[in-house]
Image (cartoon, grey):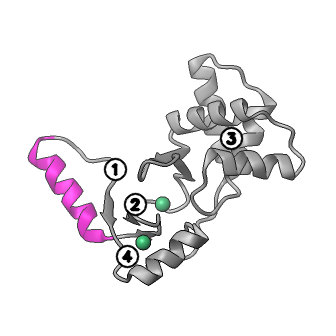
């Protein structure tokens, strides 16, 4: 699947409107966090973004990164996932609409998949109760079929996004 073109100006405008509506301050740092977060074409943690920013020239505090990620999640620019006990990961909502996640509980290996049957099901379930579906979030927890592979994945502790 091709990467979606991220329209950064549209995201900035969305963020600006959100901050105005909530009467939050419209700081340069917050917008810098948005720009940098939008460069990730994958899931990332708050710490990864913090390290990325500080090693590429942005002097920014961890607290600012965390609080801005929170705001970006509130205004639906980012989606926040908590797959297992460990720290939350984020991804840009516009990056890959309507995908779900399959995660190995042991090593954290993750696959992103799109399944049109789930979209139909989401609509049908909502309609059944007289509502209109907007989105859904599904996480399938699993374990790698092969324990040696799982072990290797755990050692390299990667999280890779796979297209289906
Ligand atoms: Zn994802
Ligand atoms: Zn595994």
The answer to whether the residue labelled 4 contacts the one labelled 3, judged by CB atoms less than 8 Å apart, is no
Q: Earlier in the sequence, mark 1 or mark 3?
A: 3
Dominant secondary structure of the residues highlighted in magenta in the image: helix
Of marks 4 and 3, the one in the foreground: 4
Is residue 3 left or right of 127 when viewed as pictured? right
Q: Which mark is residue 151?
A: none
Dot 3 beta carbon under 8 Å from ligand 1: no
Foreground: 131 or 103?
A: 103
Which quadrant contains ligand 2? bottom left
Q: Which mark is residue 12?
A: 3
Residue 155's x, y, as percent?
Answer: 57, 71
Which residue is the site of mark 2? 98
SS class of the residue under badge 2? loop
Q: Earlier in the sequence, mark 4 or mark 3?
A: 3
Which one is earlier in the sequence, the residue at label 2 or at label 4? 2
**Residue 161 appears in the picture as rendered:** no
Locate residue 97, reporting x and y percent: 45, 60
Q: Which residue is under mark 4?
A: 144
- Residue 99's quadrant in the figure? bottom left
Describe the element under mark 4 as helix, strand or loop.
loop
In primary-sequence order, the first of circles 1 and 4 is 1
**Residue at 48% from the left image edge and 75% from the top image edge:** 151
- Count residues near mark 3 (Cα–Cα under 10 Å), then give few for <14, some for 14-19, many for 20+: some
Q: Is residue 102 left or right of residue 31?
A: left
- x, y percentage for residue 150? 45, 76
Marks 4 and 3, Cα distance to the nearest angstrom? 39 Å
Q: Is residue 7 magenta?
A: no
Kindly check if marks 2 and 1 are in contact, taking CB atoms under 8 A apart as contact.
Answer: yes
Secondary structure at numbered mark 1: loop
Q: CA distance from mark 1 to mark 3?
A: 22 Å
**Residue, disc 1:** 135
């Amino acid at each position: 699947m091709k990467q979606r073109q991220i329209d950064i100006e549209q995201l900035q405008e969305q963020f600006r409107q959100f901050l105005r509506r909530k009467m939050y301050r419209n700081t340069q740092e917050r917008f810098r966090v948005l720009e940098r977060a939008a460069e990730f074409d994958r899931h990332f943690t708050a710490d990864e973004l913090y390290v990325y920013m500080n090693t590429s020239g942005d002097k920014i505090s961890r607290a600012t990164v965390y609080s801005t990620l929170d705001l970006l999640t509130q205004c639906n620019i980012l989606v926040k996932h908590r797959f297992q006990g460990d720290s939350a990961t984020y991804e840009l909502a516009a990056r890959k609409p309507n995908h779900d996640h399959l995660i190995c509980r042991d090593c954290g290996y993750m696959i992103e998949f799109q399944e049109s049957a789930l979209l139909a099901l989401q609509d049908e379930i909502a309609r059944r109760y007289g509502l209109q579906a907007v989105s859904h979030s599904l996480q399938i927890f699993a374990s790698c079929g092969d324990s040696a592979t799982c072990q290797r994945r755990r050692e390299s502790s990667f999280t890779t996004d796979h297209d289906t």
